[in-house]
Amino acid sequence: GENVEQHPSTLSVQEGDSAVIKCTYSDSASNYFPWYKQELGKGPQLIIDIRSNVGEKKDQRIAVTLNKTAKHFSLHITETQPEDSAVYFCAVVGYTGGFKTIFGAGTRLFVKA
Amino acid sequence: KAGVTQTPRYLIKTRGQQVTLSCSPISGHRSVSWYQQTPGQGLQFLFEYFSETQRNKGNFPGRFSGRQFSNSRSEMNVSTLELGDSALYLCASSGQGNSGNTIYFGEGSWLTVV
């Protein structure tokens, strides 16, 4: 089955710096790659996603890049702010009779003011 | 549009008991999936239901089961609870069309087994 690896597990940056989280996956048939942000005590919230026919997507301070050949994708957060502190999960979606979303282990991001 | 609603939010059960968790998906969404979240194991896929049928299942023992009703609401049940079942149980729903494979999570049900 699909396997998703996410790095780093913990990331600490200074406010205003950039943060990059990377994920690799194993199933080349996977075609949809969402990112979720989970704040303490809440469920994960979708923040950005990318489909396999696109190499890069940007939404204000957040961007995602996808390299289908190498089977890896990354989340980039620029000009980080304290409210960006949370756990971020990458996910890979494939279809086996129904859509199945497999998550990375998560990255705990700390933004120091 | 209301989001995914899960009940109860918090509960404490004793080993050996059983528990039922409920999930109401976003209006119009027909797919409901369940995940178990623990600090050590991250988000683990339990199962996915669509139109009252289980389409996908994760690697959990048979003590974990679920069902979906005709109005797309879903329940999951855990029987003979073990201490290791303590976790946050998340329900997610997804719709149709191009966004059909985007899942939206509820706030979760925190289960503590003592």
Image: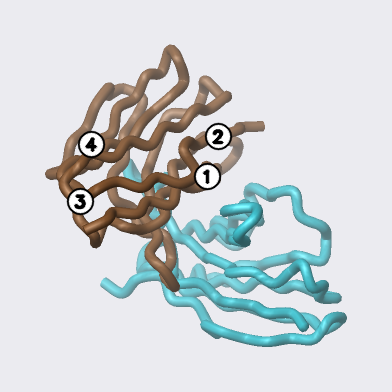
Chain colours: A brown, B cyan
| Residue found at x 47% / y 74% | B24
Q: Which residue is mark 2?
A: A4
| Residue found at x 27% / y 22% | A55
Question: Whole-percent x and y of residue A41?
Answer: 44, 73
* Quadrant of residue A70 within the rendered picture: top left
What kind of residue is marked 2?
Answer: Val
Mark 1 neighbour class, 10 Å CA radius: few under 14, some 14 to 19, many 20 or more:
many
Q: Earlier in the sequence, mark 1 or mark 3?
A: 3
In this rendering, do the residues under marks 3 and 2 share a single chain? yes
Q: Earlier in the sequence, mark 1 or mark 2?
A: 2
* CA distance for labels 1 and 4: 19 Å
Q: Earlier in the sequence, mark 3 or mark 4?
A: 3
Q: Is residue A99 visible?
A: no
Q: Which residue is mark 1?
A: A103
Secondary structure beneath dot 1 equals strand
Q: Along the horizontal axis of the image, is B53 left or right of A86?
A: right
Mark 2 neighbour class, 10 Å CA radius: few under 14, some 14 to 19, many 20 or more:
some
* CA distance for labels 2 and 4: 19 Å
What kind of residue is marked 3?
Answer: Glu
What kind of residue is marked 4?
Answer: Ala
* CA distance for labels 1 and 3: 27 Å
**In this view, A80 is above or below A57:** below
* CA distance for labels 1 and 2: 6 Å
On-image quarter of the N terminus of chain A: top right
Q: Which residue is mark 3?
A: A15
| Residue found at x 38% / y 67% | B26
Q: Earlier in the sequence, mark 3 or mark 2?
A: 2
Judged by depth in the image, the label closer to the viewer, 3 or 2, is: 3
Q: Which residue is mark 4?
A: A63
